[in-house]
Amino acid sequence: MEAFFAKYQAKLESNSFILPNHMDCRVWGGARYASGYGQIRVAWPLGTFITRKHEKVHRLAWMCFHKQIAPHYDAFDQVLHVSHLCHNRLCIHPTHLVLETKHINEERKHCKLQRLCVGTHNPLCIF
Ligand SMILES: [Zn+2]
Ligand SMILES: [Zn+2]
């Protein structure tokens, strides 16, 4: 898996750039889904049990940084998301991404709307 993560880390870096904003978001410059998230074609290693060939770029960025495949469920069968603390869908900055429940990710939508973190989750959103 080490070689897999290194290969895709290099692809992520070569297809992205640092946005000159106060948060230093690293923005994906490649393909996108209609939803606005970055899209990348992935040759998954055998044994990962992932059959999809494409992945959201920010999920892959989380995986390359943490050197593990992002699980879709936690031990209590709750759905897990890789969330953006910065609310920038194209951002792949590793410290702006967190693996957490779908429930918490949805809470963050309120923060995005009011451009202020509601403060009920940890880590807090970045603005
Ligand atoms: Zn960001
Ligand atoms: Zn928040």
Image (tube, rainbow, N blue to C red):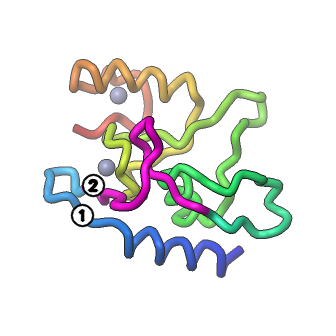
Residue 11: horizontal and vertical position, in percent? 47, 73
Residue beneath disc 2: 25
Indicate whether 93 appears above or below 116: below
Q: Please state the extent of the stretch shown in magenta in the rendering.
A: 25-41
Residue 102 shown in magenta: no
Q: Earlier in the sequence, mark 1 or mark 2?
A: 1
Name the quadrant containing residue 5.
Answer: bottom right
Toward the viewer: 59 or 123? 59
Give the quadrant of the C terminus.
top left
Residue 37 sits above or below residue 46 on the image:
above
Of helix, strand and loop, which mostly describes the magenta segment?
Answer: loop
Badge 1 vs badge 2, beta-carbon distance below 8 Å:
yes
Tell me where residue 12 appears, x and y as whole percent.
Answer: 44, 68
Mark 1 residue type: Ile
Beta carbon of the mark 1 residue lies under 8 A of ligand 1: no
- Pointer 1 local density, CA inside 10 Å: few below 14, some 14–19, many at least 20: some
Q: Position of residue 118 (x, y in %)?
A: 32, 20
State whether label 2 is within 8 Å of ligand 1. yes
Q: Secondary structure at mark 2?
A: loop
**Residue named by callout 1:** 18
Q: Residue at x 66, y 61 (%)?
A: 68
Q: Is residue 98 left or right of residue 48?
A: left
* In-image side of 56 versus 86 (left or right): right
Q: Is residue 16 left or right of residue 62?
A: left
For label 1, the SS is strand
